[in-house]
């Protein structure tokens, strides 16, 4: 399989398995010990923070990966400065949201204020993973992710031991731990940059990517819409239903971590496809099998792990799993296009999908409850896969027509 390293894949798979076990284990503990209402309130805060984060130059992640893959360490300083300024503005946005949107819900409002003050450092977690990924330092990246997860599991254990389930305590504990960890990692990495090479166009591309991705924050609105139209308990049920399907994204991330350095360094779409092609059929078969197996066994697993009070989430889980697993390999085709800095595709792709999903949420959730949220994700995932395939074929043919005798 070319430069695809099975040894690296094995290591990443083991670490991802550990991360998955720790993640599911911590979710099981949350579900069993923390009241539904508190769990739902925390999810609302987390979703609100994620939405604001989407406006804080989130597209610089593309610049970080490309800069790292091309050894342009000088870009990192510019990116870090821009990101921190955006994070400060995000802090004020969260403070305003706490006052204006949740004034009638004091528990959520007060906890969101705490999250706002932690936010500028907390958002540094978006800097170091793409940099290490682009630099192909995958083992270090996996080790850091695993250590961070262990810290958070330890925090959960302490909170349960002391029965500290207050919403403010949860926010300070989890947001604060992530912020401190990310700050330490950034400080540790900073002196190890070996040159001051820059490419301002790559940094500008990240700003373009941010502008293109602003509508992407609409994707994160599902829990807020559920909270508005249904209840805080339904937010908890929906969150539990997403736990296993989100592991599909984690598995996808293993392959992406391995392939992104090669795809980002490719000189053309043809070259990126030459790298991906031998692996693509295997990826399709793998995710198809996972989709079928998960759809069959998850309804049995959910009640065993999360107690009877979350049994109702099992049917939602199996369909969300199927919705995310089968179309998953098509994402790599989109990654090839994005790596070639095709701005038209970037803007179109970042616009239609969140608008489609958000529209489906607004249309289906009020009428069909949580099944509406599941249906929205299922439809949007299939459309996304189709668009990636069609766009990739179009760009590849266009490139071949321009340079019919070109080589990968």
Image (tube, rainbow, N blue to C red):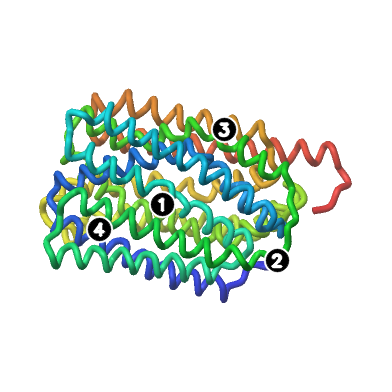
Label 4 residue SS? helix
Residue 172: % across, % down: 27, 53
Tell me what residue is drawn at x 55 percent, y 60 percent: 257
- Nearest the camera: 312 or 62? 62
Q: Nearer the viewer, mark 2 or mark 4?
A: 2
| Disc 2 target residue | 194
Q: Nearer the viewer, mark 4 or mark 1?
A: 1
Residue 65: % across, % down: 62, 53
Tell me what residue is drawn at x 18 percent, y 62 percent: 159
- Nearest the camera: 355 or 287? 355
Cα–Cα span, label 2 and label 4 = 40 Å
Tell me what residue is drawn at x 53 percent, y 35 percent: 213
Cα–Cα span, label 3 and label 4 = 33 Å
Q: Earlier in the sequence, mark 3 or mark 1?
A: 1
Asked if disc 2 and disc 4 are in contact, CB closer than 8 Å, the reply is: no
Q: Nearer the viewer, mark 2 or mark 3?
A: 2
Cα–Cα span, label 3 and label 1 = 23 Å
Cα–Cα span, label 4 and label 1 = 21 Å
């Amino acid at each position: 399989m070319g430069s695809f390293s099975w040894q690296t894949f094995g290591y990443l798979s083991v670490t991802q398995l550990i991360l998955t076990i720790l993640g599911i284990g911590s979710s099981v503990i949350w579900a069993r010990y923390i009241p539904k209402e508190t769990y739902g309130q925390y999810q609302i805060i987390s979703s609100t923070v994620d939405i604001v984060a989407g406006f804080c130059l989130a597209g610089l992640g593309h610049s970080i990966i490309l800069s790292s893959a091309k050894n342009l360490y000088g870009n990192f300083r510019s990116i870090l400065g821009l990101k921190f300024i955006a994070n400060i503005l995000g802090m004020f946005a969260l403070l305003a949201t706490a006052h204006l949107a949740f004034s009638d819900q004091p528990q959520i409002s007060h906890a969101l204020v705490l999250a706002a003050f932690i936010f500028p450092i907390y958002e540094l977690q978006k800097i170091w993973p793409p940099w290490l990924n682009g630099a192909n330092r995958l083992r270090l990246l996996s080790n850091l992710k695993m250590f961070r997860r262990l810290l958070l599991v330890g925090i959960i254990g302490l909170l349960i031991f002391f029965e500290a389930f207050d919403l403010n305590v949860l926010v300070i504990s989890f947001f604060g731990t992530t912020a401190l960890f990310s700050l330490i990692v950034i400080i540790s990495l900073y002196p190890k940059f070996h040159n001051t090479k820059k490419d301002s166009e790559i940094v500008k591309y990240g700003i373009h990517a941010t502008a293109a991705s602003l509508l992407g924050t609409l994707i994160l609105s599902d829990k807020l819409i559920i909270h508005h139209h249904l209840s805080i308990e339904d937010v908890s049920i929906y969150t539990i239903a997403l736990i296993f399907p989100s592991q599909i994204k984690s598995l996808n991330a293993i392959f992406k971590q391995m392939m992104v350095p090669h795809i980002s360094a490719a000189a053309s779409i043809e070259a990126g496809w030459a790298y991906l092609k031998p692996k693509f059929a295997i990826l399709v078969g793998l995710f198809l099998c996972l989709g079928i197996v998960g759809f069959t066994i998850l309804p049995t697993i959910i009640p065993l792990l999360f107690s009877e009070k979350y049994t109702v989430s099992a049917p939602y889980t199996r369909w969300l799993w199927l919705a995310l697993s089968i179309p998953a390999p098509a994402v790599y085709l989109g990654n090839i296009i994005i790596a070639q800095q095709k701005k038209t595709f970037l803007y179109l792709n970042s616009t239609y999908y969140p608008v489609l999903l958000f529209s489906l949420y607004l249309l289906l959730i009020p009428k069909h409850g949580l099944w509406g949220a599941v249906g929205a994700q299922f439809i949007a995932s299939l459309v996304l896969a189709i668009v990636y395939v069609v766009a990739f074929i179009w760009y590849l043919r266009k490139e071949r027509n321009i340079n019919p005798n070109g080589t990968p």
